Image (cartoon, rainbow, N blue to C red):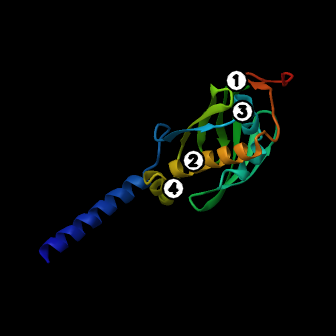
Amino acid sequence: MFKRAIGTAALAIGGVILFKQLNKKQSLTDLASIAESIDVNVPLSTAYNQWTQFEEFPRFMKSVRQIRQLDDKHLSWRATVGGKEKEWTVEITEQTPDTRIAWHSTSGVRNAGVVTFHKIADNKTRVMLQMDYQPEGVAEKIGDQVGTVRMETRANLKSFKELLEQRGTETGAWRGTVSKTEAHQPTPAR
């Protein structure tokens, strides 16, 4: 009985410590990070072109409800995060055809990241996603600690792969570039 009481007390103290840690205000350096990749059996330009179709993300991203492209550099996101519907705006800070797309949020849910595209073979592309984000509230912080975001990211990449491999072609493309200073008009596709 004494051992059970000590075990229960230790568990309660551990819970209090965890709760306090999860409720601390996060600083700019307290962002969580993930990095995932997947090989997709399509040419590099096909994988890149499909990724530029941001409004179609809900087709392969389970928690994303809607994305509206506001202009060449800005997107409005609506998604379920930690069981709650949230909205935020994203600015694309860099976009180079067939190479990379980088972004950061400008309002709402704090996140930033980059997706890069790597030719493995003529019909095989590695899509690599790196993202920093800031979990808010206890539920999101616990979800982050148990790997919920990582698992969902893996599932989203797998769904992207399946969608694209089943179709065999992209649904559209934007071949323009975005640099930190301005957006450039698309160059003709070759």
Amino acid, disc 3: Tyr
User: Residue at left 66%, top 37%?
Assistant: 41
Q: Who comes first in sequence, dot 1 or dot 4? A: 4
- On the image, numbered disc 1 is attached to which residue? 180
Would residue 138 be found to the left or right of residue 37 on screen? left
Q: Who comes first in sequence, dot 1 or dot 3? A: 3
Q: Under tag 1, what secondary structure? A: loop
User: Residue at left 80%, top 27%?
Assistant: 175
Amino acid, disc 4: Glu
- On the image, numbered disc 3 is attached to which residue? 48
Amino acid, disc 1: Lys
Amino acid, disc 2: Thr
Q: Are marks 3 and 2 in contact (CB under 8 Å)?
A: no
Would residue 58 be found to the left or right of residue 10 on screen? right
Quadrant in which the C terminus is drawn: top right
Q: Are marks 1 and 2 in contact (CB under 8 Å)?
A: no
The numbered disc on residue 153 is 2
